[in-house]
Image (cartoon, rainbow, N blue to C red):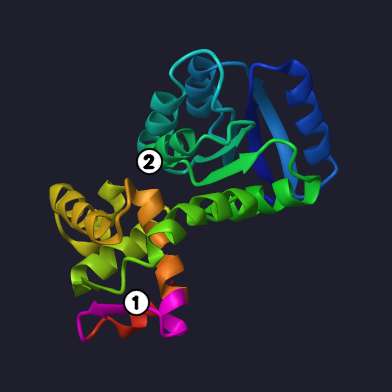
Amino acid sequence: MNPFIRICIVDDHPLLREGVANILKRRADLQVVEQGANADEAREIAQRVRPDVMLMDVNMPGDVFAAVRFISTELSDVKVLMLTVSESENDAFLALEAGALGYVLKGVSGPELVLAIRLVAKGQTYITPDFVNKLLSTFKTHAAEIHTFDLTLREEQVIYEVSKGLTNREVASKLLISEKTVKHYMTCVMQKLHARNRVEAVAALRYYREREALGRFHIGVGKTSVDARTRF
């Protein structure tokens, strides 16, 4: 087993790439193995080098989201972590929908970036906390209007797997259902949670779980899904 987390950095700003590389090289368990400057190079590097983690910018030449989708679906052993200045909710949603496991804003501290890389390398999701709070603020505007909603057991199971960063295909394989069925359940969940996409749905459910614990909401669910509920 390789003792290092092998990392590739793809960004169209050379100075930023070098700066990030220098920060990461100080950690004994991290190894920067390649760099690139655009979406096409990200795809090529991912196929050729097969790093553990691809650090990619959102705003650089080429179709970045298509590159993320290709890497996450065709090279499942390569995890994608976005490192960007973009605080656009839409950019974050598109990147995470495409299969990225993390979204970190540039200007982040070295220790936080290292933490994000280590978590994403393990297949876990990481989003800059301040950015998560920004997403959650969207749901607070609806909170006073929503007092109860019902999720079926299967909807709970699907949203739980999605919250771990799994793609629709991976969720379908794990739950032994079709990818089309997963999409149907996610559509139902998003409608019930007043979410625009799967990322908002995960964040919204976590927010409502916290409110439910305080007695401000009631989330109805299948009788055998108690264990799944405690995982959020």
Query: Does 153 sit left or right of 46 as displayed?
Result: left
Residue 112 visible in rendering: yes
Whether residue 205 is situated above or below residue 21 in the rendered picture:
below
Magenta-span inclusion, residue 37? no
Q: Mark 2: few, some, or many residues within 10 Å (few <14, many ≥20)?
A: many
Question: What residue did someone put label 1 on?
Answer: 228
Are discs 2 and 1 less than 8 Å apart at CB? no
From this viewpoint, which residue is outermost toward the front? 144
Above/below status of 52 relative to 41? below
The location of residue 117, given as percent across then percent down, is: 64, 47
On the image, the x and y values in percent for residue 231 come to 43, 75
Residue at horizontal 73%, vertical 39%? Answer: 31
Q: Is residue 155 left or right of residue 44?
A: left
Magenta region? 211-223
Which residue bears the numbered disc 2? 97
Tell me the kind of residue under disc 2. Answer: Glu
Q: Give the percent coordinates (x, y) of residue 28.
A: 81, 49
